[in-house]
Image: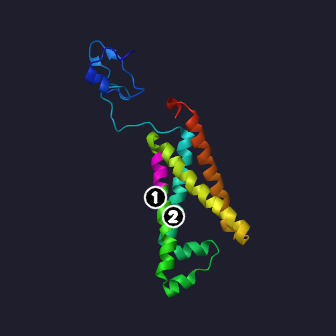
Amino acid sequence: MSCSNLTARERLDVRPGATCAVNPSNGPDRRPGGGLGSDPMAEAAPPLPVRLLLAASGLVAIGVGAALALDPVGFQAAQGIDAKHLAVGHHASALSELRAPGGALVAIGLVALAGAFRASLASAALVAAAAVYLGYGLARLSSLVLDGRPSDELLVALGFELVLGGLCALALLGRARSTPAQR
């Protein structure tokens, strides 16, 4: 039905895409998810494939970031890098340089997770996740060419980064081509 039978104030309260039906006995429709009286903080989540991709991207970034920020020497050792000298000599500057990207990854992971549950944040979350994962993956590829073959663990990370980043970029392109109702 049209919203023409609502007052000017009632029309301002109607969210885009919401129903505007009027029940003659009770006035404007106040069903959950309907136009008037619905929770303004309630919002639809993005489509399931986007939700799963953003959730996976967010959880991976949070896990890797937290490990790097909380135990940079142990994290480096898990990648086949001997960084024990940093902990023994207490090189605060070097440890700071290792922890900082961990914090950034945690922050990006939280953005990705938020986008998995809030449709209005999904595009920004996809941009952030694609940029971070493709940035890491492409930097590792350039290092492979410039510096030689890293450990197997880092080659696996390279693959995951390129796949997750590529999927996020493709999902973002798909959202850009879809109608607002499909997002």
Q: Please report the bounds of the magenta region as a residue range.
A: 109-116
As measured in the structure, the alpha-carbon distance from the residue carrying label 1 to the one carrying label 2 is 9 Å
Residue kind at label 2, given as amino acid type: Gly
Position of 59 relative to 140 (above/below): above
Name the residue rendered at 55%, 75% in the picture.
Answer: 74
Indicate whether residue 114 is drawn in magenta.
Answer: yes
- Kind of element beneath mark 1: helix
Tag 1 residue? 107
Q: Quadrant of the N terminus?
A: top left
Q: Main secondary structure of the magenta part?
A: helix
Q: Residues within 10 Å of mark 2 (few under 14, many from 20)?
A: many
What x and y, as percent, mark residue 79?
63, 71
Q: Is residue 11 left or right of residue 93?
A: left
**Numbered label attached to residue 165:** none
Q: In which quadrant of the rendered view does residue 26 lie?
A: top left
Number of numbered markers: 2
What x and y, as percent, mark residue 12?
30, 26
Residue kind at label 1, given as amino acid type: Ala
In the current view of this chain or complex, which residue is farthest to the top?
24
Name the residue rendered at 49%, 46% in the picture.
Answer: 124
In the current view of this chain or complex, which residue is farthest to the bottom?
89
Q: Is residue 10 left or right of residue 58?
A: left
What x and y, as percent, mark residue 19?
39, 22
Q: Is residue 97 left or right of residue 27?
A: right
**Numbered label attached to residue 65:** 2
Indicate whether residue 117 is drawn in magenta.
Answer: no
Position of 24 relative to 42 (above/below): above
Position of 142 relative to 53 (above/below): below
Q: Are marks 1 and 2 in contact (CB under 8 Å)?
A: yes
Q: Residues within 10 Å of mark 1 (few under 14, many from 20)?
A: some
Q: Is residue 104 visible?
A: yes
